[in-house]
Amino acid sequence: MTSSRLIAISLMLLLASGCTMFRDDGPAPDEESVAEGPLGPIIEPELDRRDVQRARIDTENWELNATAGFLNVEDFGTEPVYGGRLGYHVTEDIYLEGEYVQSQISDSSFRRIGAPIFESEDEDLTSYSLSVGYNMLPGEVFLGSRWARASATYMTFGVGNTEFVGEDNVTYMFGFGIRTLLSDWFTIRLESRDRIFESDLLGENEWKHNFEITLSLGAFF
């Protein structure tokens, strides 16, 4: 046997003994075993679980609102207005609503120049309508980093009647606003409307735009 063959055999024996020394015989008895899956070891991640509170929203469809604000009657200035609204939510996005509001209008600016319009200085104005509303942009209102409430921006269209100075006027109404749920049943609404009707109180029959802004507090039931 040549010296080169002896050296090769000696190296092979040394390599074989080294593999035996470094062979992994498994985890020590005090080590935690890892579950084996079809694709290899399965490692359970350590995640911090946080408590999630689901929003409680009343499932009732009726909504009753008390309303107060200001109404600007074209040619006669701005006066307080108040009333009530009753709505029925047909779907999540569409609702029907009836309303009744009342205000008192004055012709004092005309009386100052000696041209009174009304028999008495103050006249009652009442208006009622039936409208359909559409929730366009559902979302949330945030106050600070911890307080958030469900809300929706909506549009409303309606038709009704306005009684003013002894006359009944067919009235068309267009408005938009934002509704916020303060709790699962309590709501607050900020809304602007334009009440449009024909009037000839100043001698010429014209379409009058009467703008209104109101704040409403309501309840689902």
Image (cartoon, rainbow, N blue to C red):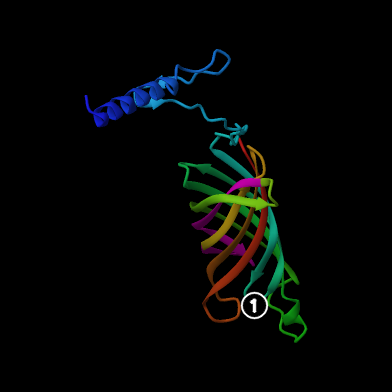
Question: In the image, what residue type sits under mark 1?
Answer: Asp
Q: Which residue lies at the image location 55% right of the left edge and 34% below the top edge?
A: 60
Which segment did they paint magenta? 148-172
Q: Residue furthest right?
A: 112
Check if residue 1 falls in the magenta segment: no
Task: Give the overall secondary structure of the magenta segment.
Answer: strand
Q: Left or right: 190 with respect to 112?
A: left
Q: How far from the left and from the top, in percent, is residue 64?
A: 62, 43
Quarter of the rendering containing residue 221: top right
**Residue 162 lies in the magenta-colored region:** yes
Instruction: Label 1, secondary structure: give it.
Output: loop
Q: Is residue 95 visible?
A: yes
Among the 4 quarters of the image, the one containing residue 18: top left
Which one is in front, 61 or 84? 61
Q: Is 144 or 179 nearer to us in this picture?
A: 144
Tell me what residue is drawn at x 47 percent, y 43 percent. 92
Residue 209 in the image: state x and y as whole percent.
Answer: 56, 72
Residue nearest the viewer, comparing 90 with 203? 90
Residue tagged by mark 1?
Answer: 75
